[in-house]
Image: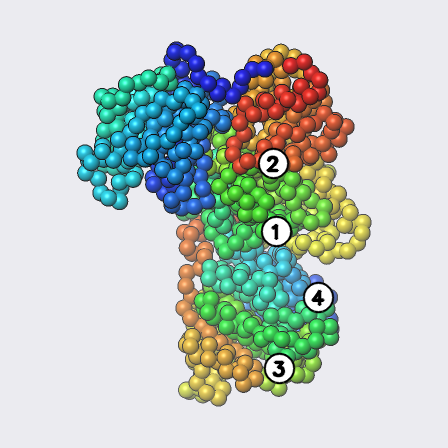
Amino acid sequence: MLDTTQDSVQGNEQIVNEVCMTICTVNGSGSATANNILYRALFRMGILTSGKNIFPSNIKGLPTWFVIRASARGYTGRVEYDDMVVAMNPATIQKDVSYLRNGGVLFYADHLEKPEITDKEVIIYPMPIKTLMKQVDVPRNLQSYMENMLYVGIVGQVLRIPEEILKATVEHQFRSKPAVAESNFNIVKLGFQYALENIEKTDRYYLQPLPELRDYILTDGNNAAALGSLYGGLQFCAWYPITPATSLVESAIDHVGKLRKDPKTGKNTCVILQVEDELAAAGAALGAGWAGLRAMTSTSGPGISLMTENIGLAYFTETPMVIWDVQRVGPSTGLPTRTAQGDLSMLYTLGHGDTKHVILIPGTVTECFEFGWRSLDIAEKYQTPIFVLSDLDLGMNAWVTKRFEYPNQPIERGKIIWEEQLEQIKDWGRYKDLDGDGIPYRTVVGNMSKKAAYFARGTGHDEYGNYSEDPKNWSDMLNRIGAKLDGVVKDLPGPIIRRAKADADIGIIGMGSTHDAMIEAQDILAEMSIQADYMRVRSLPANTDVREFIASHARNYVVELNRDGQLRQILSLEISEYSEKLISISEIGGLPLPAAWTAESIFAKEKHNGKNC
Amino acid sequence: MEKTVELNRIGLALADYKGKPSTLCPGCGHNAIANQIQAAVWELGILPEKVMKISGIGCSSKSANYFLNRSFGFNGLHGRMPTLATGACFGDSSIKILGISGDGDTASIGLGHFKHIIRRNVPMVYIIENNGCYGLTKGQFSATSDQGLVLKHQGVNLLPPLDLCMEALISGASFVARTFSGDVKQMKELIKAAISQTGIAVIDVISPCVTFNNRDDALQSYSWGREHEAPIQGITFFSSREDMQLENFEEGTYREIKLPDGSYIVLKKIDKDYDPTDLNAALDLLTESYKYHYFATGLIYFSDVPPTIQEQYDLPAEPLNRLTADRLRPSMESLEAINASLY
C-alpha cells in the first residue's frame, strides 16, 4: 500500500510549490488580514492554493487556525498534517506542533515558550516579533495587527515569495486605503529583511512563480452566491443573521447599490431587508415571490427548521422563491463555525405532507455564482421553492476559482402573464394545466384585468384557487405538482463526471465542497492501483446520467460529510434497483474532507471486498 | 320600473366589491367586518384590483375570501400574515394592502411579527378580528380572552388579556383604532380613514364569536359590547375638504384631521376632550377602560406618518414587478470589473 500520509520528509532535494502550512493565532487579533495576504501572494505566483479558516464560535481571544495548502498539481483539499506551522498563540503551540510531520518547519514568536518536540526532527525558526516591533512606531491599538504582518514578511522570505508580490498583495488587501497599505507593507518588509539577513534556510520548501492564473479569481462562495443572485435579477431578499450564511447577504448589501441601479431611472431595483427571524425571512420572500418579484432568502440549518412551514406553503401555492442553505454542523446549535453536509435529507422532503423539492448543489465558488442566477430562473419557470445547498467551507473560505462567467441565457420569468396575455386565454385558472406540462399560468398583483385576481391559500384548492375538500380534486392537484417537478430535471445541472485513466470497476460519488478532495482521492486511488471514476452530483432530483453512472460500476462509494450517508440514502431510494451498489463513506468531524483519508477508507473497503489491492 | 344600481365615483356598483359567500356562523361578527370593508372600499371609489388581501389562519383569516373578489388575496400561515405582507408590499406599491388577522393569529402565535411590521411601517391596514377565543378549533382561550372567562372544556381563564391597541401604540403605530362589530357605522368610517392613511393603520375590531364566546358577561360578546361601548368621539370620514359640511357641526365640538391622501376625518367630541394625537392620553385611556370595565372605541391614536418601508428604499415609481429583465441584470462590463478586483 502506498504511504499516503507521507508522515516523513526524507532526502535533500528542494520541495517546490508543495507545502501545507498552518498559521496558529488568536481570533480577533487581525490575523485574517495577514493570512489573506500570504494566501493571495501564492495565488499571484500562479500556484494553485487553498486557504481554510478553522475558527471558533467566538469574537475575541480563542484559538484560530488558517491552513494554506499550495499544490502545483492542484490538490487543494485539506490534509491532516503540516509541513509548516507558524505559531503565534501561546495557548496552542504545544498541540500545534504535534501536527508537524518529521522534517517539518516551525516558525514561532520567540516570546512564546518554546515547545518540546521529542518525537521528530523539526527545523525551527524563532521569530523575534516583540524585538522587531520595538524598531517601529505603531499605535498600541494596532500592535497585534502589525505583529501579524511581521510573520507575513518572515515566512514569505523563507519560502522565497518575491518581495514585489508581497507588496502587490498588501496593496490589494488595502486597495481603498493606500496609506494603510504602505504602513502595513513597511512592517512586512521589516520581517522580510530580518529573515533575509538572519535566517539561514535549512528546510527544503520553496515556492517558485508559475505562469499567472489569469483565468482565476480568489473569493468565497458566499460572495459568489450574492453576485450570482444580483446578476440573476434578484429583486427581494429577506434574511436573518446566522453563521455561516450571514456573509452571503452582507456581500449582496456591499454590491447591490452599485450593481442594481435601474438603468432607466437610477433608482434601486433590489430590496434587501433584515427581518425579525427566519420565519419572517421565508414569509417575506414568499410574499415577494407571490407578488411577482424574484425573491430569495439565505440561512443555515437552524434557520431552515424555522422556515419549514412557509416553504411548504410556497410549494403548495406554487410560489417561486430561492433558499440558500449554507450548511454548518448540526443537529441543534451544533458547531456553528464548522462545515458539514447534513441538511440534504431534511431539504429534499422539507415540510409536512407530500413534498419534494429541487436542490442545487454547487461544488465550486464559480458554481455558487452560476447557481445564484440559475436558481432564480428555475424557481420562476417551475413556480416552486428552489434550494441551493452550500456549506461553510465553500461559503466562507476563499478559494482559487475560475472567473465568473456572464449568464449565457436571458432572465427566465416563466409563465407570468399580464393583462393582454390573460385576455387571450379562455377560462384561465391559476392552477389550470393548460400546456400539459403541469405548469400553470400565473398572474401577480397589479394586473388590472378583472379576471386576474385569485385567492392563494395553503388549504385545498381547485384549478381556480377556490377552496375545495374534494378528494379527487386534492389528488389531481398534488399529482400535477408532482408531475410538474418531474419535468424540472431536464433544466437542472447534471453531474460532473471525471473518468479514471483506465477502465474503472468502481465509482466514487460526492457533492458540494468536497470536489477538490475527491479528485485528489481519485488520483491517490489510482496510485494505489484502484481505478475509480468520479461523479459529483450537482442537483436533486437526479437525472439519468446519475443512474447510468451508478449502474455502470460494480461498487459506488458515496462520500459525504454527514453521519448516515444522506446522499447515498436518497440515491438508494430513487435508484433502488442499484441500491446494493452504493456504499457509504462518511466523515463528520466538522472539517473539510481530507483526500488521503478518503482514499484509504475506500481502499480498506475494497480490500474487505476481497479485491486485490 | 327599472331598478337603478348605485355607482361609486369610478362607476362601480357595490356588487363589484363582493366576495365569496361567507361560510362563517350566522351572526358572526366577522361577517359584519367583511361587509363594512367592501362598503368602505366601494365608497372610497378604489378599484378592487388596486387592493390586495393578506391573512393568516383562523375564522378571521378565512373571511378575507368573503369580500373583494376582484382583489388578489393570500390566505397564508397562522400568525405569519405580516411576513407575507412585508414581501408582497414591494411588488407594486400602488396596491393597498388589507391585512386580516385574528386574536390567536396576532396576539399569540404572531405577536412578534405584529410588532415588527408596525416597526417597519409596512403601508397597510392591519385589521384584527378579535373575538377573545379560538373559533376554528372550537373554543379555546386566546391571549385576549378576559381573565376569569369560563369556556366549556378549559374552565376558568387564569391569565390577563393582552391589549392589542396598547401593543400597537408602544410599537410605534401612527394610526390605532378600536371598534366593534355591533357598531358598523363607526367601523366603516374608521376603515375608510385607515385606508386613506399612508403608513400602517391598526384597527382592533371586537367581533363576537356567537358560537363559543358570546355569553352576556364575556368581554367580546355582543351584549357586553353594546352595554359598555363608550365611543371616545363621533367619527365622520370625508374624501375631501369640499365634501365636509361643517355647518352641521357646532363650533368647538369637533376636530378635523387631515389624512395623508388629502381626505379628512371629523371627530366629534362626546363627553370630554380626548386628544387622539397624545400618546400618553391614548395609553391612559386603554389602561383605564380595562380597569373600569368600559369599552372605549374610536380613533385612539393618530400621528404624522414616519417613512414607510417602501420609501426607505428609493425604488422606481413604476411597479417593481413590472420591470423588464433588461433592467434587472447588470452589464457584462461590470462583471469583468468584479473579476478583475478579485484577482
Residue B288 percent across, percent down from the top left? 50, 82
Number of other residues with Cα within 10 Å of mark 4, as a class: few under 14, some 14 to 19, many 20 or more: some
Residues indicated by labels 1 and 4 sit on the same polypeptide chain: no
- The mark nearer the N terminus, 3 or 4, is 4
State the residue position of label 2: A562
Protein image colouring: rainbow
Identify the mark nearer the N-term, 2 or 1: 1
Mark nearest the camera among 1 and 3 is 1
Q: Name the residue under label 3.
A: B225
Residue drawn 25% across the image and 35% down it: A130
Separation of marks 1 and 3 at Cα, in angstroms: 37 Å
Write down the chain letter for disc 4. Answer: B
Q: Which amino acid does label 1 sit on?
A: Asn
Distance Cα–Cα, label 1 vs label 4 = 21 Å
For the point 27% across and 33% down, the residue is A129
Q: Mark 3 lies on which chain?
A: B
Q: Are marks 2 and 3 in contact (CB under 8 Å)?
A: no
Whole-percent x and y of residue B75?
A: 64, 58
Instruction: For marks 3 and 4, give the one nearer the viewer.
Output: 4
| Residue kind at label 4, given as amino acid type | Leu
Q: At label 2, which amino acid type do we have?
A: Asn
Q: Are marks 2 and 4 on the same chain?
A: no
